[in-house]
Image: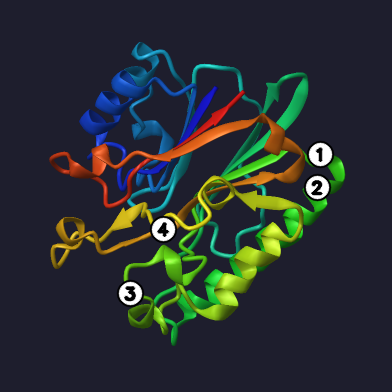
Amino acid sequence: MKITSWNVNSVRARLDNISDYIGKTNPDILMLQEIKTEEKNFPKDIFKKLGYDSKIFGQKSYNGVAFLSKIEINNINLNFINDPKKQSRIISGEINLNKKKVKLINIYVPNGNPIDSEKYDYKKKWLNLFINNIKKEIRKNNNIIISGDFNIIPDEIDVYDAKKFDNDALFKIEIRKKFREIMNLGFNDVFRYFNKTKIEYTYWDYFAGSWQKNNGLRIDHFLVSNNLLENLKNININKIPRSKQKPSDHTPIELIIN
């Protein structure tokens, strides 16, 4: 099974690129972030023709998350956390994997910049709410896959120039500690599980030739509960979509599970 996560930065603006990606890589489940549309305007019919059912938690012009799936996803939940701003940032559901019930959690964490603003406070509150609810979820089911745009750079190896991000909401130590707090609940950062020292990125800004210079960040992640590690086969950051015309500034990450 292939599960892909991708911040598409507007599903309608990237529709050709998403369709091309699906045709070439054939994921079983595609977890989308920053779809930037309400459900009524989501291109469900186009994805249905490609063989995918759509589960959507949309919002006009901003945020939004969705599942595209060729397999059944049950118990869809749009209220995993009680977001104080009522933003569409998290959708969850359940799949069956080798007789295990696995919780899929698709997230788009607030960016949080600038750090001297309410946006940063919101990011911290959002992460605290998320962590508290993950603790509750683990008591019910500890087979969990969390994926999406975390807007967190875990370590210096995950950014092209760490010093430039000392005061950025993606790299502040208290935010990175939140990432580790999630992992300490019994999760592994799958990319680092397979690649201890490899330098790869999932995001390149549109400006200042960031893509051409490979000035990137690794901020999109798969966190998988430890008892699912035996099911993992591989993870890949697929950079091809970032090189296309009119690309998202993020690129897909692909998890292969036995």
C-beta proximity under 8 Å, tags 1 and 4 = no
Residue denoted by label 2:
138
- Residue contact at pointers 2 and 1, CB within 8 angstroms: yes
Q: CA distance from mark 2 to mark 4?
A: 26 Å
Characterize the local packing of mark 1: few (<14), some (14-19) or many (20 or more) Cα atoms within 10 angstroms.
Answer: few
The residue mark sitting in front, 1 or 4, is 4
Nearest to the eye among marks 3 and 2: give it: 3
Q: Earlier in the sequence, mark 3 or mark 4?
A: 3
From the viewer's perspective, tell me whether residue 15 is left or right of residue 163. Answer: left
Amino acid bearing label 1: Asn
Per the rendering, the mark at residue 161 is: 3
Q: Position of residue 240 (x, y in %)?
A: 25, 38
Q: Which mark is residue 141?
A: 1
Which quadrant of the figure has residue 239? top left
Disc 3 and disc 1 in contact, CB within 8 angstroms: no
Query: Judging from the image, what secondary structure is the residue with disc 2 in?
Result: helix
Q: Give me the residue at 33% from left, 45% from top.
A: 251
Q: Nearer the viewer, mark 2 or mark 4?
A: 4
Which residue is under mark 4?
218
What is the distance, in whole Å, between disc 3 and disc 4 at their CAs? 12 Å
Element at label 1: loop
Horizontal and vertical percent for residue 40? Answer: 39, 32
In primary-sequence order, the first of circles 2 and 4 is 2
Q: Nearer the viewer, residue 62 or 142?
A: 142
Q: How many numbered marks does the figure carry?
A: 4
